[in-house]
Image (cartoon, helix red, strand yellow):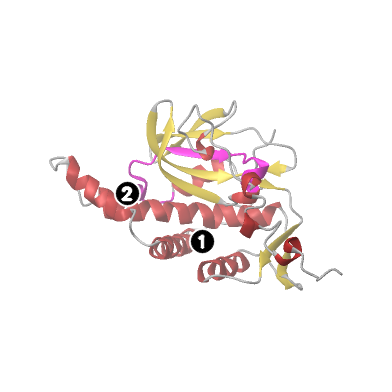
């Protein structure tokens, strides 16, 4: 008679991640062996132009769009915003990037935009702000289980015009290109500038031309040890203050839906 003992059935970890199943084929953004550049620094045949901001030329890199993606704003829109930002807040700033993310990047590392403190272009390094192309969604979902930071982002999206309805598992908003334009042009851009201003205040502004490099390096290391929550708080406060100023000056909203296209 069978005593009922089955070693396979008793091991509940078989075929699960606890036993290592699927560990070799997890989704991850590939890193080529022939370059040290991160995925957001690599482009395929981009269009290179320039805009004039406070009398200085800033490089604009526009990557070709994939089908069903779009850029919510263009270089002229960015130029309008930057020319109404205090000159000292853009000290040393050099590049704007309109970037087409790969499908896997959209899934694994979704962002509206990002600040790169040292972005390599033509063998030179400049601070850069990247504006990501977004899919032509009709619906945008947001998880119900939220960290403090995600809850804050949820509130920001609502203030940007996203009207969410509660579903069984998530919040769902019907959106269009104008909604994304409002998020990226009127908040994300200002938020990333806020991160840059924070960097200037901690690292660049306290220094002088006569100081030793080690002194600058200490401040630089200190900045990157600042907790993320503190950096986000600074950037959010800056963006809110600057958005209020731009609204008062009637610089924003920039209503014309001008976009880069293929």
Badge 1: residue crowd in 10 Å (few <14, some 14–19, many ≥20): few
Q: Position of residue 232 (x, y in %)?
A: 44, 62
- In the image, residue 160 sits, relative to residue 37, either above or below, namely below
Determine if residue 72 is in view: no
Say which element carries label 2: helix
Q: Which residue is mark 2?
A: 88
Q: What residue do we see at 67% from left, 50% from top?
A: 22
Q: What residue do we see at 65% from left, 71% from top?
A: 144
Q: Which residues are magenta?
A: 84-106
- In the image, residue 102 sits, relative to residue 6, either above or below, namely above
Badge 2: residue crowd in 10 Å (few <14, some 14–19, many ≥20): few
Query: Does 86 appear in magenta?
Result: yes
Query: Does 228 appear in magenta?
Result: no
Q: Position of residue 185 (x, y in %)?
A: 56, 52
**Marks 2 and 1, the one that precedes in the sequence:** 2
Residue 247, labelled with which disc?
1
Q: Give the quadrant of residue 15.
A: bottom right
Say which element carries label 1: helix
Q: Considering the image in quadrants, where does the C terminus appear? A: top right
Residue 50 vs residue 215, the one in the foreground:
215
Q: What residue do we see at 59% from left, 25% from top?
A: 45
């Amino acid at each position: 008679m069978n005593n009922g003992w089955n070693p396979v059935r008793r091991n509940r970890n078989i075929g699960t991640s606890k036993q290592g199943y699927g560990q070799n084929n997890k989704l991850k953004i590939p890193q080529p062996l022939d370059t040290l550049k991160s995925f957001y620094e690599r482009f395929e045949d981009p269009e290179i132009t320039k805009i004039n901001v406070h009398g200085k030329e800033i490089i604009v890199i526009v990557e070709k769009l994939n089908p069903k993606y779009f850029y919510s704003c263009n270089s002229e829109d960015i130029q309008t915003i930057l020319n109404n930002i205090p000159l000292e807040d853009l000290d040393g700033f050099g590049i704007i990037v309109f970037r087409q993310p790969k499908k896997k990047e959209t899934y694994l590392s979704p962002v509206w935009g990002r600040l790169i403190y040292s972005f390599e272009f033509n063998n030179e390094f400049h601070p850069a702000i990247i504006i990501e192309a977004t899919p032509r969604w009709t619906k945008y979902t947001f998880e119900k289980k939220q960290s403090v930071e995600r809850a804050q982002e949820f509130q920001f999206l609502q203030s940007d015009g996203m009207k969410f309805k509660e579903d069984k598992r998530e919040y769902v908003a019907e959106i269009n290109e104008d909604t994304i334009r409002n998020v990226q042009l009127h908040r994300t851009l200002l938020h990333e500038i806020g991160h840059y201003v924070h960097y200037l205040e901690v690292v660049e502004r306290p220094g002088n031309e006569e100081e030793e490099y080690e002194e600058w390096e200490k401040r630089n290391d200190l900045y990157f040890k600042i907790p993320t929550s503190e950096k986000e708080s600074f950037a959010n406060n800056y963006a809110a203050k600057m958005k209020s100023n731009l609204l008062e000056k009637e610089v924003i909203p920039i209503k014309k839906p001008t976009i880069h296209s293929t």
